[in-house]
Amino acid sequence: MFDVTAGDLVQFAGAVAVSNCPGAPQLQFMAGRPNATHPAALGLVPKPEDPVDMIFARMEDAGFSPTELVSLLASHTIARSDTLIDNRQAVPFDSTPFTFDTQVFLEVLLRGNETLPPASGEAAAQVPNPLAAQGEMRLQSDFAISQSPQTACFWQFMVNNQQAIQQGFHDAMAKLAVVGQDTSKMIDCSEAVPVPVPAVAKQATFPAGTGPELLQLACNENQPFPSLATDPGQATTIPECPDGDTNLNDCPS
């Protein structure tokens, strides 16, 4: 039997949770983190309103390149905010918040003119997007990283490239999960992480009501952008529940 620490439980729970999202990679899980002896210092995690160079510098200090940061941001395809929007929880960053796909890399690039009502003091955390009326928000940091000369081409490379986001997130997350740890004293228990649900058989698409005319492409390497279809019909509210319900209170427990 092995001692199980709080850090191990948090890391294992996250790896298992990600496996429930169609298209996610099977994450590595290393066990053996010692228990924390004191709280972490404030300010170690960049904020969405921070300048992009400050975000890159903080991540570099932790050992991550700008492209590794982009790979970690694949998590935003299944991420939602509980604190940035006024009186709202579970606000998604893309139109398919329960599927690990490349939609977030596409949708962040789309020009918009609307934001959601921010929580107190959080106005600078978001920038306009074309899907705000459907319930989506765009982080200022995501957009800034998509436009930075250091990461714009890699960001565009991720669009409609399921294998790239799976492998990139797997590798970058494996590195992040053991920052500050002595891996020689840890045990690889990755076999305990369930095999994820397979990816959906769908290419990236422009959400209904948007299209290629809204793209804001900053890559200067003459990198071709994939030819993508647009979802038919009218724009619809983004689901708040995995079963497609649009009311968070009705989500199955």
Image (cartoon, grey):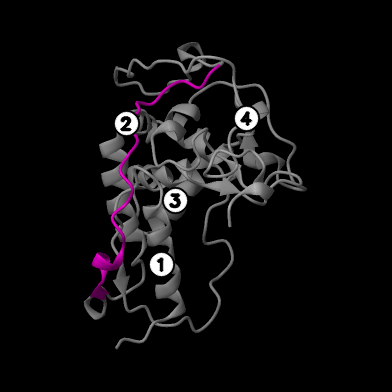
Describe the element under mark 1 as helix, strand or loop. helix
User: Callout 2 environment at 10 Å: few (<14), some (14 to 19), or many (20+)?
Assistant: few
Q: Which residue is mark 3?
A: 57
Query: Residue extending furthest top?
Result: 213
| 3 up-or-down from 215: above or below | below
Amino acid type shown at disc 2:
Ala
Q: Which residue is mark 2?
A: 201
- Point out the tag, 2 or 4, that comes first from the N-terminus: 2
What residue do we see at 49% from left, 36% from top? 96
Q: Which residue is mark 4?
A: 237
2 or 3: mark nearer the eye = 2
Label 2 – label 1 distance at C-alpha = 29 Å
Describe the element under mark 4 as helix, strand or loop. loop
**Labels in figure, total:** 4
Magenta part, dominant SS: loop
- Point out the tag, 1 or 3, that comes first from the N-terminus: 1
- Point out the tag, 2 or 1, that comes first from the N-terminus: 1
Expressed as whole percent of the image width and height from the top left, the position of residue 186 reads: 26, 77
Question: Which contiguous range is marked in magenta?
Answer: 187-208
Amino acid type shown at disc 3:
Ala
Amino acid type shown at disc 4:
Thr
Q: Which residue is mark 1?
A: 11
- Point out the tag, 4 or 1, that comes first from the N-terminus: 1
Describe the element under mark 2 as helix, strand or loop. loop
Label 4 – label 1 distance at C-alpha = 32 Å
Residue 211 visible somewhere in the drawing = yes
